[in-house]
Amino acid sequence: MLDEWFLSEPGLSVSKAFCDELQPLKELLHGECLLQLGCCGQNEWMPLLRYQHKWIATMHSNVNLSTFISELDQLPLDRNSVDCVLAPLTLEGTSRMTVVDEIDRILKPMGYAVFLGINPISLWGARLRWSEDLCFGHTRSTTRSAFSVKRAMIHRGFIQCHLSYFHYIPPCSNPLWIQRFKVLNQLSKMISILPSGFYCLVMKKYQEDPIHPQAITFKEQLAEMRIQPAQQGCNSEQTR
């Protein structure tokens, strides 16, 4: 259902907003392997990201775009095997946070997790809670704030690299009204009229380099303990 929704008029508008939001991050997001959780129409933002291999994992068959079919919390990938995980509206489509654990498992140290989600306090968040026809059909959906996702990732050893809110166009399916509401994106840069519909959160899997202290033998420690007082005594005699 989400894949089909991204081909509708409101879905195309949101897809364009995702592209605009990821455009400035292309210098940050580059490497060998990129994995996207879920298929979103034509995935127009994928060419922006400079990765050698780009995979799409879906729970349902999509012959044209799916790389493999799998539960998103049970991916057939090795630990520490992916440079970047992109999750567009992924957490909204499930009530379980096991997807976050799976992202942590497959992501390489110093890799990036990118979450594109719906702001719960926006009109989009209200529509998602009160209506079943937004973008997930009759599938049970959940709204998660950027703060809750950030807190869950920090608990797993991640650090925040980027957080932004965007797309102030209300949820509507009429192309004419979508075109008229585009002025809100410009006005909201100067004054906040409405809560933004979406957020972009980038978290980095941080891992400290282990510090190996230099081995000091017992004889060296004993010699150091004996020499220091002697040197201090010599210096004191010279000053006299």
Image (tube, rainbow, N blue to C red):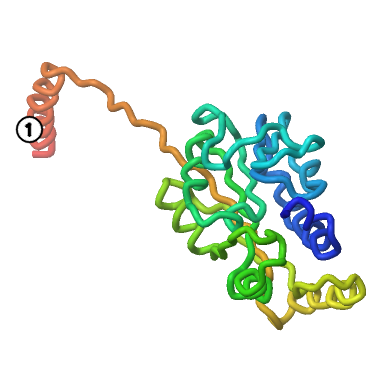
What residue type is disc 1 on? Answer: Gly
The residue sitting at 64% across, 44% down in the picture is 37
> Observer-nearest residue: 124 or 221?
124
Q: Is residue 197 visible in this depiction of the protein?
A: yes
- Residue 169 in the image: above or below residue 78: below
Vertical order, 214 against 28 (above or below): above
Quadrant of res 77: top right
Q: Tell whether 50 sits left or right of 225.
A: right
Tell me where residue 29 sits by quadrant: top right
Instruction: Identify whether 236 is placed above or below 135.
Output: above
Q: Residues within 10 Å of mark 1 (few under 14, many from 20)?
A: few
- The number of callouts visible is 1
Give the residue drawn at x 57%, y 42%.
Answer: 72
Looking at the picture, how far across and down is residue 13, in whole percent?
A: 82, 63
The x and y percentages for residue 179 are 89, 72
Q: Quadrant of the N terminus?
A: bottom right
**117 or 160, nearer to the observer:** 117
Q: Which residue is mark 1?
A: 233
The outermost residue toward the right is 176
Q: Position of residue 136 (x, y in %)?
A: 68, 59
Q: Where, quadrant-wise, is the C terminus in this rendering?
A: top left
Residue 166 location (% of width, % of height): 70, 66
Say left or right for 231 vs 207: left
* Left or right, 235 with reference to 33: left
What residue is at 52 percent from the left and 27 percent from the top?
A: 78
Q: Is residue 162 visible?
A: no
